[in-house]
Amino acid sequence: MTGSSHISIQGVHKVFQSGGQDVHALQSIDLEIRRGEFVCLLGPSGCGKSTLLNAVAGFSLPTSGTITVDGAVISAPGPDRGMVFQEYALFPWMTVEQNIAFGLQIKKTPKATIQAKVDGLLDLLHLQDFRQRYPKDLSGGMRQRVAIARVLAIDSPILLMDEPFGALDALTRRNLQDELLRLWTELGKTILFVTHSMEEALYLADRTVVMTYRPGTLKRDLVIDLPRPRDVASPAFNSLKKELGQLLLEEQDRHQQDEFRGAAAD
Amino acid sequence: MKGFRHAASGILVPLAVLALWQLLSSRGWVNATILPSPLQVLVKWWAYLRPLEAFDPAMGSYLKWCLSGELIQDASGSLYRVLVGFFIGGGLALPLGLAMGYSRLAYGLFNPIVQILRPIPPIAYIPLSILWFGLGNPPAVFLIAIGAFFPVLMNTVAGVQNVDSIYLRVGRNLGASRFTQFTRIILPAATPYIFTGARIGMGTAFIVVIVSEMIAVNNGLGYRILEAREYLWSDKIIAGMFTIGLLGLGIDTLMSRLSSHLLKWHRGLEQG
């Protein structure tokens, strides 16, 4: 265990019961994440990347092994690890403002402080004109901005992001990726980001961890030391993309064979 | 222009029905005792609405005199019973529904008896209600409360059980206590269901009030149309029926306005 680790994942296994059979979703996962590091978990669906993220969030604890944050073992969800979900999960009965303020109200923050903080976040994420709107009246990109603002409001040192931009169109997606990088640079959060897009991982992360398809293990831990802002058309970017693509393809094949086997068995 | 045409086409069929009805009656093709003409109904309706005696300042204010007509008295009597019964029935169903939706234990304890009692139509309680409460408002309110109870209960249970688990995960992630989860997430998320239940419950209450007045009460709209039959006043029966219909429409419109005002965030969203 190194002193500089913010999140430390050690020997984590996760076994699910499915149809009377044990499914090894995660197996022997060891991962150290430094403070302020931006790490992407990359892999095909079914590789357990979301399971790992949920374990760090405390929603479903590992079957064995430990996850610690600042040396303390995780046993439940908590506001020190703010989560952004793919499906936004904004409270539809609250306005943009109320959604952002919710986490602060839980912490019994004084009203004036909440107002100031919400104002600041509305500014930071360019949401001033939408503060009174309900989520149903916002586009997908706007909703995800609100979801990010809601998590930033509680000042968690760690941001967990579960394919947050997966449902957005390419342009909005790039826009929010840039926005996220800006916030990350400004606020110095530690980010664990799940994606199935190689390009997204390469564009955002300091490190990209590729996971294997069932059982979910760490296949490759790749440091991406390209300078930011990254040029997706540069040769360096594309050679990394090729390398990642090769790794992912192998896992994708195993995933497919498994599905064919499943279909044959049915 | 479009709005006008829309409204115009909306009254076309009712007008045609009225015209045909008037024709049938004024030509003498149907017996006026069995089916009086629309005009005759309207005249009777006006007589039913009007105060019975001439205005006398000694008896009270002008407004009170205006409202002293039989129809107003009947309608307000019926409305009173509906509201009291609805609030008792709904008021008991809401907390029980919230508990049953939230806690598996409460659901396990109460669901069997609810499932046994629920299919019994409120009307079937009439004999018992008279035995227990005699005649007048109490048995009527009891029946109406039963009518409103089950729709509110079932919808509240469904509303709480169908709260999307992702909202609860967000709540836990942000550090919400169980109490906060309940009041700020589960309760608002369930309100569209609860309002639907209230609207159905109000509709049931309105049906039950008419029936209960026919049997256990000696005023109100239900009583009045049954009484009119004794005298073969078919015009009064029909006038009473239209009043019941208009009152029901009014209540339902009010409920739906209220719910879409309170559920601004939900308008245009798919439920569930």
Image: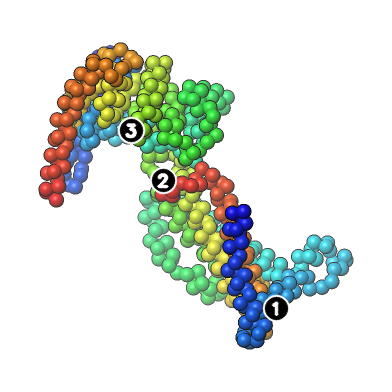
Q: Which element type, helix, strand or loop, lies under badge 3?
A: loop
Check whether the beta carbons of the residues at disc 2 and disc 3 lie within 8 A of each other: no
Task: State the residue at coordinates (57%, 47%).
Answer: B261
Q: Which residue is mark 3?
A: A166
Task: State the residue at coordinates (78%, 70%).
Answer: B51
* Marked residue nearer the N-terminal end (2 or 1): 1
Q: Is residue B35 above or below residue B91?
A: below
Q: Is residue B220 above or below residue A74?
A: below
Task: State the residue at coordinates (14%, 47%).
Answer: A263
Are labels 2 and 3 assigned to the same chain?
no
Q: Which residue is mark 1?
A: B40
Name the image quarter holding residue A38.
top left
Mark 2 against mark 3, which lies toward the viewer? 3
Check whether the beta carbons of the residues at disc 2 and disc 1 lie within 8 A of each other: no
Q: Is residue A20 above or below residue B40?
A: above
Question: Which three-letter amino acid code belongs to the residue tagged 1?
Answer: Gln
Q: Which residue is mark 2?
A: B163
| Chain for disc number 3 | A
Assess disc 2: are there few (<14), some (14-19) or many (≥20) residues with their C-alpha within 10 Å of its C-alpha: some
Question: Which three-letter amino acid code belongs to the residue tagged 3?
Answer: Gly
Residue furthest toward the front?
A: B1
Marker disc for residue B161: none
- Residue B203, horizontal then vertical, whole percent: 54, 63
- Residue A104, horizontal then vertical, whole percent: 49, 28
Q: Nearer the viewer, residue B48 or A102?
A: B48
Q: CA distance from mark 1 to mark 3?
A: 68 Å
Q: Is residue B63 left or right of residue B135?
A: right
Question: Which three-letter amino acid code belongs to the residue tagged 2?
Answer: Val
